[in-house]
Amino acid sequence: MWPFRRKPADDTGLRGERLAERHLRRLGMRILARRFRVRGGELDLVAEDAGTLVFVEVKTTGSARHDPAERITRTKLDRLTRAARAYVRNARREDAACRFDAIIVLLNDAEAPTIRHVRDAFTPRHWS
């Protein structure tokens, strides 16, 4: 379909990523990449926290009825791992410590957004 039209969910996701980025900066982290994509995977945010590479998966919702963290499936984790390996290789940071965080953003129309940051949210299979 041309011209390309963004879906409302895309806008929600972008807003959540911007809020997550601001949250990480407040914690003193440096943002290294946004939406890093490789064939078969994507990282929402890559940050550096005191020398540790932090790969961040951001999940955003406008409703508290569903926990967006439930959308982080094993398949999604495998794709995150693939993208993280590519990032480490491309950045020549093979010796850097790495961790995988998740940030859950709940957008409330009546209130300020709620951000839940889960450090070390998961350890990918076969990560070394």
Image (cartoon, rainbow, N blue to C red):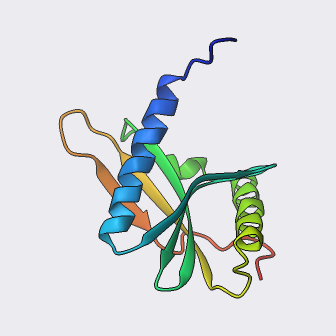
Residue at 44% x, 71% y: name it: 30
- Whether residue 67 is visible to the viewer of this picture, yes or no, is no
- Whether residue 23 is visible to the viewer of this picture, yes or no, is yes
Residue at 52% x, 85% y: name it: 51
Q: Which one is nearer the viewer's eye here, 36 or 75?
A: 36
Q: Does residue 7 appear left or right of residue 21 in this picture? A: right
Question: Residue 118, how many percent across, how many down?
Answer: 45, 67
Considering every residue shown, the one lying at the far left of the view is 110
Q: Where 82 falls versus 91 (above or below)?
A: above
- Tell me where residue 2 sits by quadrant: top right
Q: The C terminus appears in which quarter of the rendering?
A: bottom right
Residue at 74% x, 52% y: name it: 41
- Tell me where residue 55 sits by quadrant: bottom right
Q: The N terminus appears in which quarter of the rendering?
A: top right
Question: Residue 32, how many percent across, how many down?
Answer: 53, 65
Question: Residue 88, how many percent across, how many down?
Answer: 71, 73
Q: Which one is nearer the viewer's eye here, 67 or 43?
A: 43
Residue at 27% x, 38% y: name it: 108
Q: Does residue 16 appear left or right of residue 96 in this picture? A: left
Mark count: 0
